Structure formats: structure tokens, C-alpha cells
Image (cartoon, helix red, strand yellow):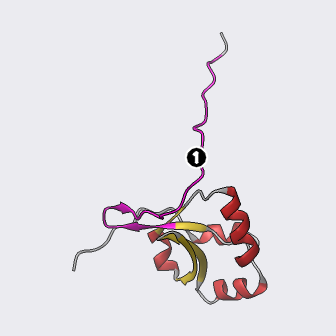
Amino acid sequence: MEEVVYNGNLNVAVFNQIELSEAEMAQVSAGQFPILLAQEGVFTKKYVTEAELPKYSHWDALQSDKDAQKEIHGNLPIVWECGEDGMIPTGLQHEILEPPTEEAPAE
């Protein structure tokens, strides 16, 4: 069986940086990490193990979707999944992030 190489950027440190409910913290302590998976046009709350975290990468949801999901599920990371051929399309619109501009050095 061929080993799958994941290239997502989700890791345990994320869960140390966000504010979670007591119930969600208990799940994290038990090794079950809550995520909101953006896939097939919907957001789905699921729990994954630490070993599965690298299958997922942060996804830049629209601010309105972030706000709606936070209202429903709390402050969980919104992610998309890495497949064999790269990231699996979400079927959702995403935030367009402007690349940082580089200022010319002062002369």
C-alpha cells in the first residue's frame, strides 16, 4: 500500500491558539479535534485525530460564512481537505486575499 503524503497546514498548535467551549476542549483533550470542513458546497463539523490533521489546510471562507459558522459552531477552524491530486474543491466561494505589497527600499 502506497503511503499518502499530506500537505495541509492544520496542526495541534491551532487548537492552543483559539478559544473553544468547555465541551470542545474536552474533545481535544481526548484526542478528537473539531473542524469545519468546507466541501461539496456545505460546511460540516467533524472530529479528526491528531494523525489526520495534516490532511486539512486552512480555508479562507467569506466573512459572512465565517460569522454564520461561528454563530452555529463556535470558533472552529474552517478547513479544506488535501486529496491525492491537491486540494479538494469546496464548492463554496472564498475570500480573495490581496498579496502583501512590498514597499521599495528608501533611497
Is residue 74 or residue 19 the one in the foreground? 74
Q: Position of residue 44 (x, y in %)?
A: 56, 78
Residue occupying the far left of the picture: 1
**Does the magenta-highlighted stretch encompass residue 82?**
yes
Quarter of the figure with the N terminus:
bottom left
Is residue 76 or residue 53 the one in the foreground? 76
The residue drawn where x is 58% and y is 86% is: 31
Amino acid bearing label 1: Ile
Is residue 13 or residue 92 the one in the foreground? 92
The residue drawn where x is 69% and y is 57% is: 63
Determine whether, in the image, residue 75 is placed left or right of residue 90.
right
Dot 1: within a 10 Å radius of its alpha carbon, few (fewer than 14), some, or many (20 or more) residues?
A: few
Q: Position of residue 65 (x, y in %)?
A: 66, 63
Is residue 97 or residue 18 the one in the foreground? 97
**Does the magenta-highlighted stretch encompass residue 56?**
no
Q: Which residue is mark 1?
A: 96
Determine whether, in the image, residue 83 is placed left or right of residue 79.
left
Tell me where the magenta segment starts and ends, as one range: 80-105
Q: Is residue 67 above or below residue 99?
A: below
Determine whether, in the image, residue 59 is placed left or right of residue 25.
left
Q: Position of residue 47 (x, y in %)?
A: 56, 83
